[in-house]
Image (cartoon, rainbow, N blue to C red):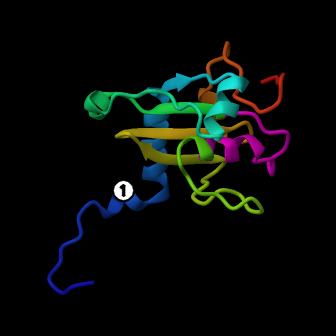
């Protein structure tokens, strides 16, 4: 670090503050429901959701809730990572995973990929099924 540099906003790095920020963002996020066919096309690069980047800065974050058979099941998350151009190693959980949620920016929008075993899964609308590579899921 360079001498004479002032660091501001250090309190935002504290876990409790970050949690408040995450909860605030997720509670106002737009939820996307992807059906299995689109997820398959998306993960092979054949289809991606269209998102206008010109209006992205004033739009809410996007949340996508995904199915997991267990806490260590990342099959659907890996497919979602491929959709958004995120690298993942097939033998390991995706990098940057925080409490079962992956946060990143895509076309100027904050994105959340939230697994069934994440504490943030509570923000999934009751009438929406999680995205899955499997034909039918519950929860």
Secondary structure beneath label 1? helix
- Residue 88 in the image, given as x and y percentages of width and height: 64, 58
**Is residue 40 found left or right of 104 in the rendered image?**
right
Q: In the current view of this chain or complex, which residue is farthest to the bottom?
A: 3
Image position of 91 with respect to 50: above or below: below
The question of residue 80 being in magenta is answered with yes
Question: Residue 35 occupies which quadrant of the picture?
Answer: top right
- Residue 46 is one of the magenta-drawn residues: no
Q: Name which residue lies at 61% across and 46% down.
A: 82
Residue 75 in percent (x, y) is at: 77, 45
Image-based side of 31 in relation to 139, left or right: left
The residue wearing badge 1 is 12
Instruction: Name the residue nearer the viewer: 35 or 112.
Output: 35
User: Where are the magenta residues, as a range?
Assistant: 66-81
Total numbered circles: 1
Is 52 left or right of 43, judged from the image as shown? left
In the current view of this chain or complex, which residue is farthest to the front?
46
Image point 49% across, 57% down: which residue?
A: 15
Q: Quadrant of residue 52?
A: top left
**Residue 137 pos. (x, y %):** 82, 24
Query: Is residue 98 positioned above or below 131 on the image?
Result: below
Q: Quadrant of residue 20?
A: top left
């Amino acid at each position: 670090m360079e001498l004479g540099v002032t660091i501001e906003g250090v309190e935002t790095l504290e876990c409790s503050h970050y949690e408040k920020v995450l909860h605030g963002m997720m509670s106002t996020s737009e939820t996307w429901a992807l059906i299995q066919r689109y997820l398959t096309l998306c993960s092979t690069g054949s289809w991606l959701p269209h998102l206008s980047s010109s209006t992205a800065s004033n739009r809410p974050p996007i949340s996508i809730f995904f199915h997991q058979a267990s806490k260590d099941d990342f099959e659907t998350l890996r497919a979602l990572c491929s959709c958004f151009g995120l690298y993942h190693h097939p033998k390991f959980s995706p990098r940057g995973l925080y409490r079962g949620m992956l946060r990143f920016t895509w076309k100027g929008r904050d994105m959340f990929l939230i697994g069934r075993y994440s504490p943030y899964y509570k923000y999934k609308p009751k009438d929406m099924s999680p995205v899955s590579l499997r034909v039918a899921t519950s929860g």
